[in-house]
Image (cartoon, rainbow, N blue to C red):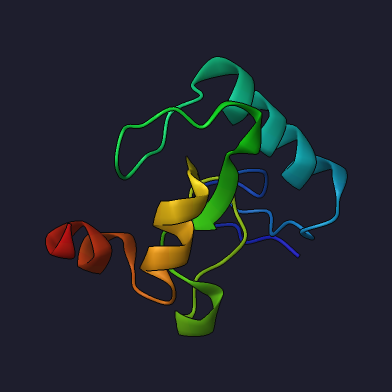
């Protein structure tokens, strides 16, 4: 499914097991490798996190998915990125 707000490709929703999702995760791990929230190294154990959780209406698009460490991903839970960063 995709949305035409800024072009269909920009807001294509990804299946978590699909190639786009896995390619985005691999690219973030390889090129950045640091946690978006704490700035610590993630390496190949980094996880994709929804800045706006799916449970709160967030979508699985590349603009809502960021690389983070397991600790931050677990601690963030269902908070938005903004809510989590305010608590850090």
Check the image and name the residue furthest to the front: 71
In front of the other: 61 or 79: 79
Tell me the quarter of the image containing the N terminus.
bottom right
Give the number of callouts.
0
Q: Quarter of the image holding residue 78?
A: bottom left
Residue 71 image offset from top left, x and y in percent: 44, 54
Q: Is 41 drawn above or below residue 72 in the view shown? A: above
The front one of 25 and 58 is 25
Q: Is residue 44 toward the left or the right of residue 64 in the image? A: right
Q: Is residue 58 above or below residue 13?
A: below
Q: Residue 14: where, in percent of width, then height? A: 74, 56
> Residue lying farthest right?
18
Residue 86 to residue 67: above or below? below
Q: Would you say residue 18 is visible in this rendering? A: yes
At a point 48% along the width and 44% down the height, the residue shown is 69
Residue pictured at 66% horizontal, 50% vertical? 8
Image quadrant where one finds the C terminus = bottom left
x then y, percent, for residue 6? 50, 48
Decide if residue 2 is on the left or right side of residue 77.
right
- Whether residue 64 is visible, yes or no, is no
Q: In front here: 75 or 3? A: 75
Is 58 or 82 nearer to us in this picture? 82
Say which residue appears at 37% left-offset and 39% top-offset: 36
**Residue 11 image position (x, y, % from top left):** 60, 53
Q: Is residue 66 left or right of residue 81?
A: right
Q: Residue placed farthest to the top in the image?
A: 31
């Amino acid at each position: 499914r995709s949305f035409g707000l800024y072009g269909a490709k920009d807001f294509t929703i990804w299946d978590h097991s699909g190639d786009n999702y896995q390619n985005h995760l691999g690219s973030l791990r390889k090129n950045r490798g640091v946690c978006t929230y704490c700035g610590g190294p993630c390496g190949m154990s980094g996880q994709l996190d929804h800045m706006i959780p799916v449970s709160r209406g967030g979508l699985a698009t590349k603009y809502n998915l960021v690389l983070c460490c397991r600790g931050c991903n677990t601690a963030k839970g269902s908070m938005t990125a903004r809510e989590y960063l305010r608590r850090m």
